[in-house]
Amino acid sequence: MSGNTIGTLFTLTSFGESHGAAIGGIVDGCPPGMELSAEDLQIDLNRRKPGTSRHVTQRSEDDRVEILSGVFEGKTTGAPIGLLIRNTDQRSQDYSKIMDTFRPGHADYTYAQKYGIRDYRGGGRSSARETAVRVAAGAIAKKWLKQRYGVEIRAYLSQLGDFQIPFVSWGDLQHPDNKIFTPNMAIMPQLETYLDNVRAERDSVGAKITVVAEGVPVGWGEPIFDRLDAEIAYAMMGINAVKGVEIGAGFDSIAQRGSVHSDELTPNGFATNHAGGVLGGISSGQEIRVNVAFKPTSSIPQDRNSIDKNGQPVLMQTTGRHDPCVGIRATPIVEAMLALVLIDHALRNRAQCADVNSGLKVI
């Protein structure tokens, strides 16, 4: 199976399955000399891990990450960083009933057709369990970007099903009772009631996550095939259940006039940011703003029509422990994927950026 690596200079190769012994990854290209410990990575892993509230899957995983290589005396050496997260709460018997059938909305059918074999235990390699490794690797990238350039990457839940969530403050995300990454604690009771009703109906909903990177310098990215916005979209579409990505105004730009969408420049900077911080595939120095759309959870305990491995019709239910909205726990995953793209382009930019004494004023 190919396609398990992302990045050019800063790369992540992940491995493992949902119900295997462990998941893990190899991070290569991390600059040497940065202080790094497992605790640095654990912060974001704790934000992503299951079982943190009644609104997410109750699979109980500690998600404790182990750093196996690439760090000596508390600092990165420049060598590949080996990461390991052991699976401790597998309940493979939950999936024994569907070993010969294909769950609607899942990768069961396509995996079986492509490889001639599939790991039916929680989806195996196609499970979102694998994204824990991305979060650990993204935490490395976030720390380096913050220390080297002052880049801050944060995300929040901006829409839950048909429930639009007005942004209030980043501070609301730090509230101890905020388990669903809302930037608006005032409407938390409404959101929780909404999710409770969805679960009571044995159904699921989608979500929109907005991620923002502040402090990104001008000049990161490439102008043609490796455009910064193109690689951001590529990374986001590589997350389980993602069905849409917007940079800046995104699809709203269809209805905008050119006189509105084009971001005017002034001696003090840009007047607006409809471009989302990227022009011609290169960062403009404004905040990078991305919206990511997650589909409703496909695993729902309702009767669903499908077929078995012999092509015969079956009526099935997906049982087990599942999120009524997979988009909620995706918030740190989205942050991690943006960080992986940005650190890769930061390192690539160091080899080909313009002379700092060129005389062009940076706004």
Image: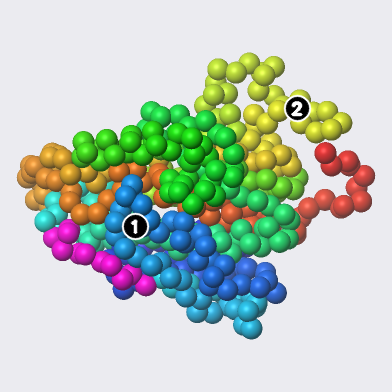
Direction from residue 273 to residue 185 in the image, left or right: left
Instruction: Give the residue at mark 2.
Output: 271
**Residue pushed farthest bottom?**
73
Q: Quadrant of the N terminus?
A: bottom left
- Which badge, 1 or 2, comes first in the chain's sequence? 1
- Residue type marked 2: Ala
Q: Secondary structure at mark 2?
A: loop
- Tell me the distance, in whole angstroms, between the alpha carbons under discs 1 and 2: 43 Å
Q: Nearer the viewer, residue 25 or 351?
A: 25
Tell me the quarter of the picture where residue 297 sits. Answer: top left
Quarter-of-image position of residue 298: top left
Would you say 299 lies left or right of 2 here?
left
* Left or right of 334, for residue 300: left
Decide whether residue 272 is among the magenta residues: no
Residue 87 shown in magenta = yes
- Residue that appears at 28% across and 67% down: 89
189 or 89, which is in the foreground? 189
Q: Dot 1 corresponds to which residue?
A: 51
Q: Residue at x 55, y 43 (%)?
A: 172
| Colour theme | rainbow
Extent of the magenta region: 86-96
Secondary-structure class at tag 1:
loop
Q: Position of residue 213 (x, y in %)?
A: 63, 46
- Determine the residue positioned at 68% across, 31% down: 273
